[in-house]
């Protein structure tokens, strides 16, 4: 499957003659830029890549289509990206930095909030549909496929009918905030496992 995925993306991400860096990973945390979105459920993808950068005392720098940082772990390079294109146009940043950093397509991982999972649950998958998530929807459209890895972080669905947007863009409750650091840490561990022991073993370890 990985070979087929790389072949599919070759013309989209890279020119035929380009040498891809198999030890480099693109980790995309989805969210919205701006102080008004800090601490909201929809920005948990940003929270995860922020934590990964902080763990290595690395700062993000503003660049084309997003804020970027790089960390090293067990011989791998993890390129951390927070798209500045806003959630609904995330695909533009993903494609740009996939090309720019010569990322092997199977080394792309998108970290995203998920209404369909209970709060605190995480699920790693190597492909899937957008599940109604606008960020994933745009990435799927830009890349022309949903065959890329994603780490879904459950935010629950405790909202009244017609209030989904308010819930997603709302701030965590006090109870959720108490538990959030451990959830983010677990997600960070899953990201690093994805890059070191591979997607299949990481799924077995973290999809409990």
Image (cartoon, rainbow, N blue to C red):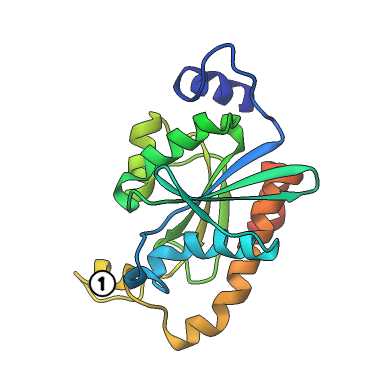
- In the image, residue 60 sits, relative to residue 196, either above or below, namely below
**Which residue occupies 31% across, 72% down?**
167
**Residue 179 placement: quadrant:** bottom right
The picture places residue 31, in percent across and down from the top left corner, at 40, 58
38 relative to 134 in the view: left or right: right
Front residue (pair 143, 21) = 21
Residue 116 in view in this figure: yes
Quarter of the image where one finds residue 33: bottom left
Q: Position of residue 111 (x, y in %)?
A: 51, 53
Q: Residue at x 57, y 33 (%)?
A: 101
- Compare residues 178 and 70 and report the one nearer the observer: 70
Residue at the far right in the pictured view? 74
Q: Which residue is mark 1?
A: 166
Q: Quadrant of the C terminus?
A: bottom right
Q: How many marks?
A: 1
Could you tell me which residue is drawn at 48 percent across and 61 percent down?
46
Query: In terms of depth relative to the viewer, which is nearer, 64 or 142?
Result: 64
Q: Residue furthest top?
A: 17
Residue 16 lies in what quarter of the image? top right
Measuring from the top left, give residue 8's x and y in whole percent. 50, 20
Number of other residues with Cα within 10 Å of mark 1, as a class: few under 14, some 14 to 19, many 20 or more: few
Q: Quadrant of the N terminus?
A: top right
Most extreme residue toward the left, as rendered?
162
Rendering coords of residue 139 (x, y %): 38, 40
> At numbered mark 1, what does the secondary structure look like: helix, strand or loop?
helix
């Amino acid at each position: 499957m990985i070979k087929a995925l790389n072949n599919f993306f070759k013309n989209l991400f890279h020119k035929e003659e380009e040498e891809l860096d198999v030890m480099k990973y693109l980790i995309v945390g989805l969210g919205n830029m701006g102080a008004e979105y800090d601490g909201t459920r929809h920005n948990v993808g940003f929270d995860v890549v922020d934590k990964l950068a902080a763990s290595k005392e690395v700062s993000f720098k503003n660049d084309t289509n997003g804020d970027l940082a790089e960390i090293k772990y067990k011989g791998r390079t993890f390129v951390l990206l927070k798209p500045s294109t806003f959630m609904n146009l995330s695909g533009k940043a993903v494609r740009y930095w996939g090309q720019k950093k010569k990322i092997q397509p199977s080394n792309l991982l998108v970290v995203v909030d998920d209404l369909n999972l209970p709060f605190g649950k995480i699920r790693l998958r190597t492909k899937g549909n957008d599940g109604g998530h606008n960020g994933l929807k745009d990435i799927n459209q830009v890349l022309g496929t949903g065959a890329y890895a994603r780490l879904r972080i459950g935010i629950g669905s405790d909202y009244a009918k017609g209030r989904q947007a308010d819930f997603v863009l709302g701030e965590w409750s006090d109870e959720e905030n108490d538990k959030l650091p451990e959830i983010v840490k677990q997600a960070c561990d899953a990201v690093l496992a994805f890059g070191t022991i591979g997607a299949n073993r990481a799924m077995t370890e973290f999809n409990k």
